[in-house]
Amino acid sequence: MSAAAASYVLGSHAEERARLQRQHATWRDAMLASWDRAGFGPGQRLLDLGCGPGFASLELAERVGPGGQVLAIDNASAYLEHLEEQLRQGQAPQLRTLQHDLALAAAELHAATWDGAWCRWVAMFLPRLEPWVDLVSQALRPGGRLVLHEYVQWNTFGLYPQGRQLAVFVERCIQHWRDHGGDPDVAQRLPALLEARGFRLLHSSSLMACSPSDHPKARWLQDFLASYPAQLSAAGRWSPEEQAALEAELQLAQQQASLWVTPALVELVWERT
Ligand SMILES: C[S@@+](CC[C@H](N)C(=O)[O-])C[C@H]1O[C@@H](n2cnc3c(N)ncnc32)[C@H](O)[C@@H]1O
């Protein structure tokens, strides 16, 4: 796949940015707990790889404080401009941005000087993982920590007992992302790649949830279902009839007891040896 074709499949428009903000709020506690586990703290130099609009980057900047440094990297100019606009308002002088395609050859990041890196929901979209893994392995100092929140098996996303059409939608999403060079099960491939570059696995856990309709994790899934079908439809991969069937299921799920199962998300904490 060419670099031009590798543009971010979910887009960087205002609605997606707002969804990412709500998503960040839903997963913020898990994120902070993972940073605690990795020992991210004051005075450190940390990377946010695939930072998006920077919701986590701003929190990383707060965590490292004025004596630390955060570099937020993404290739979507709209997201970086949003973050830079906040930085112009003086929110965090210790935070800088870098526009870089993580699937292309590594950027120069002052080798072996960074204390840690955070990366959430990014590797799954990269058509090539090696440049991204090389970048982080060169950037981190020995003992530096890499914290990942990525999916290990996206097709666990389900709604029970109602979600037959949802299962079709899930398969269609997976195919769409794979056709763009991504891998929604990317965490399956990370241990081999990281171990080969001198990383040691310190911690792994599941962040998967199974919730009733009114739980925040179920609302997060419903939020995705409120926006992404339109994008699949614009890509010619989702018909009005399929959407009508999905909406009927979602309505039923509001009236009956239901279980919302998230895509299998995992947390991995690695140490650069
Ligand atoms: C689902 S968003 C996650 C954003 C952020 N990490 C968060 O947790 O809110 C995925 C991000 O990956 C970025 N991304 C996708 N492909 C990329 C690439 N090849 N190089 C750099 N960033 C990329 C997108 O621009 C987007 O900001």
Image (cartoon, grey):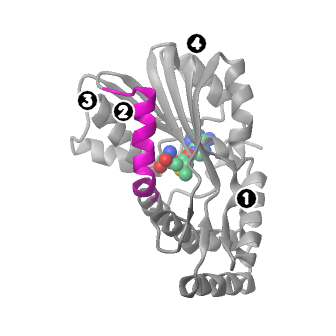
Label 4 and label 2: CA atoms lie apart by: 27 Å
171 left or right of 60 in image: right
Q: Is mark 2 on a helix, strand or loop?
A: strand
Mark before the other along the chain sequence, 1 or 4: 1
Q: Is residue 3 above or below residue 197?
A: below
Residue type at numbered disc 4: Thr
Secondary structure under tag 3 reads: loop
Specify the amino acid type for callout 2.
Arg
Q: Distance between the residues labelled 3 and 2?
A: 13 Å
* Left or right relative to 198: residue 54: left
Considering only order in the chain, which callout, 2 or 4, is on the residue closer to the N terminus? Answer: 2
Q: Residue at the location (40% across, 48% down)? A: 29
From the top left corner, tell me how far across and down residue 19 is, in percent.
47, 62
Question: Is 207 drawn above or below residue 165 in the view shown?
Answer: above
Q: Residue at label 3?
A: 65
Q: Which callout, 2 or 1, points at the residue further toward the start of the chain?
A: 2
Q: Mark 2 points at which residue?
A: 96
Which stretch is magenta?
23-41
Q: Are marks 4 and 2 in contact (CB under 8 Å)?
A: no
Q: Quickly name the residue at label 1.
A: 155
Q: Where is residue 220 in the image (x, y as percent from the top left)?
A: 50, 64
Question: Dot 1 lies on which element?
Answer: helix
Residue 34 at x, y = what percent?
Answer: 46, 37
Q: In the rendered structure, does residue 180 fall within the stretch colored magenta? A: no
Identify whether 191 is placed above or below 232: above
- Measured along the vertical axis of the image, is residue 18 above or below residue 38? below
